[in-house]
Amino acid sequence: MPRDLDLVLFGATGFTGRLVAEYLARRADKVRWAIAGRSAAKLAAVRDDLALDVPFVIADGDDPAALRALCERTAVVISTVGPYQLHGSALIAACAATGTSYVDLCGEPAWMRRMIDAHHDDAQRSGARIVFSCGFDSIPFDLGMLTLQEAALARFGIAVPRVKARVRAMKGGFSGGTVASLKATLAAAARQPSLLALLSDPFALTPGHAGPHQPSGLLPEFDPTVNAWVAPFIMAPINTKNVHRTNFLLGQPWGEIVYDEMVVTGLGDIGRAAAEALSKLNPFAGDKGPKPGEGPSQAERDAGHFDILFAGLMPDGARIDAVVTGDSDPGYGCTSKMLAESALCLLHDVDGPGGITTPGASMGAALRTRLATHAGMTFTAG
């Protein structure tokens, strides 16, 4: 059966899915796209609420036959149906089998590694380009490293071996889906303690390759590179793995990099106290915060932003920096734009071999251009 659709948004009835649908309605006017989920009534409500002129497809994340039928109709699938370790495996299998490309918001490294082991070879054979982590985790960090290394190669003729990513500003919360995914990961680790070794391994997503020792990023410290105190960054355990996988998939053009991510808290005693407090804080503890399907208002999303410095340190003491910024809430506003543009980038801008890959390895500069042109992000280096 010929593919009658270019793009399917699976999970359009969730909070983030609706944001992606709204964005696609503005940006995908020449794309044959549809919304998908398990409830016809809820999909019809989304279509009516957003005044969408698109079809919808009924499919349950636990129904392999329905998912395969969905994949056989489209070139690209966007999935916002997480936690992916609970609801995403059958869709990955269907995409890998049918040569259907795929993007999601996954920040669940144990599940990602399981999918790599199970389906990377199938995706290579079928041509499916399966790209995890196409939101705040981990596009700003993945493409920030790419931007920095391009500048380093242009200036020094070699890549930077030591990179410090420092979150200098971030306003906006984590999504309810991110919270649910982390809790599902911790629950899985409690049931299967062997997962802890994978979760703590910076090279967990580079099968067969283990690079140099990496900073743990678990303790607050004074960082002379930014002349301020820094604290652990909650997204670092997934972002660092994706950055190393990008380098791995590209054939290690950056060599054996040492890379970490931390949050800048400030100067002096105040900065130290903030770093120590942040290192003890679990923002996902308890029942506070958004539930899956919930999120901030449009005004709150528009008021958000982020600013990330990538400091590249050469062995001789030379330094080169890159900066990535976003103009809205990282967990919802920027994330929904990044996810949609990633799908459009796979659809329109890039070709390449199939496999389970990363935003930096599969889309790189083409995605960066899209995000700078359409999604309110900036990428600078020098």
Image (spheres, rainbow, N blue to C red):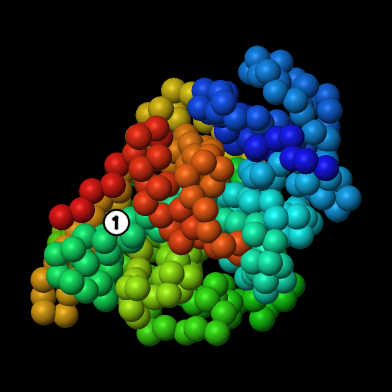
Task: Check disc 1 and give the amino acid type.
Answer: Thr
Percent across and percent down for residue 32 are 65, 30
Mark 1 crowd level (few <14, some 14–19, many ≥20, 10 Å Cα): many
In the image, 272 versus 104, the foreground residue is 104
For label 1, the residue is: 147
Please give the name of the residue rendered at 47% of the width and 44% of the height, measured from the top-left corner.
349
> Which element carries disc 1, helix, strand or loop?
helix
On the rendered image, what quadrant is the C terminus found in? bottom left
Percent across and percent down for residue 230 are 28, 62
Percent across and percent down for residue 377 are 34, 39
Vertical side of 129 occupied by 210: above or below? below
- Can residue 212 be seen in this snapshot? yes
Please give the name of the residue rendered at 52% of the width and 53% of the height, measured from the top-left corner.
351
Vertical side of 132 occupied by 176: above or below? above
In the image, 131 versus 303, the foreground residue is 131
In the image, 144 versus 353, the foreground residue is 353
- Can residue 135 be seen in this snapshot? no
Relative placement, left or right, of 272 versus 79 is left
Percent across and percent down for residue 239 are 45, 62
